[in-house]
């Protein structure tokens, strides 16, 4: 029985490793996001694109917290004085999104300085469609579509 479990565990590990290394589908719809932090709107942080988790909910189920429960797509990091551009491909790309900047991890938070959680800075909600080129100015907190868009 233990050999069977070992073989199953090894097979499962290889299957998961294969899934994790699968490249994005080159035929999937693409959209590009530019984060403009050149004017010093915020400190360095992890940048994510979060799909609005309220889509598809009944009116009675919608709360403000639902908006941060959707799919999270990690874009990278951008420090003050820099610009970052990231293109994403997803088969289910169409939807309402926000760009979110998250501060340092809990390892760098000092409770003695009243730093109890990582700060969040987030954009307004915008509709993302295939082919869109979106720019978020961090200091002005303004979304601008450079091509496509609404």
Image (cartoon, rainbow, N blue to C red):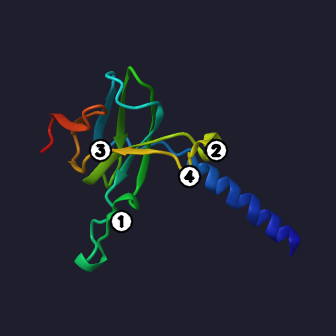
Is the residue 55 above or below the residue 39 in the image? Answer: below
| Circle nearer the viewer, 1 or 2 | 2
Q: Which mark is residue 66?
A: 1
* Label 4, label 2: how far apart the Cα atoms are: 43 Å
| Circle nearer the viewer, 1 or 4 | 1
Mark closer to the chain start, 1 or 2: 1
* Label 3, label 4: how far apart the Cα atoms are: 32 Å
Determine contact: label 3, label 4, CB under 8 Å. no
Mark closer to the chain start, 3 or 2: 2
Mark closer to the chain start, 4 or 2: 4
Mark closer to the chain start, 3 or 4: 4
* Label 1, label 4: how far apart the Cα atoms are: 28 Å
Q: Which residue is mark 2?
A: 112
Q: Which mark is residue 30?
A: none
Count of all numbered marks drawn on residues in the image: 4
Badge 2 crowding class, 10 Å Cα cut-off, few under 14, some 14 to 19, many 20 or more, is: few
At horizontal 21% and vertical 39% (from top left) the residue drawn is 132
């Amino acid at each position: 029985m233990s050999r069977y479990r070992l073989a199953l565990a090894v097979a499962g590990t290889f299957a998961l490793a294969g899934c994790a290394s699968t490249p994005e589908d080159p035929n999937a719809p693409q959209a590009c996001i530019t984060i403009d932090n050149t004017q010093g709107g915020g400190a360095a942080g992890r940048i994510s694109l979060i799909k609005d988790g309220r889509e598809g909910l009944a009116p009675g189920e919608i709360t403000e917290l639902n908006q941060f429960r959707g799919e999270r797509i990690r874009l990278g990091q951008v420090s003050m004085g820099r610009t970052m551009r990231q293109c994403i491909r997803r088969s289910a790309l169409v939807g309402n999104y926000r760009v979110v900047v998250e501060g340092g991890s809990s390892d760098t938070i000092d409770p003695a300085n009243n730093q109890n959680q990582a700060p969040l800075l987030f954009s307004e909600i915008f509709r993302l469609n295939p082919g869109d080129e979106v720019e978020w100015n961090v200091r002005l907190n303004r979304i601008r579509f450079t091509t496509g868009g609404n």
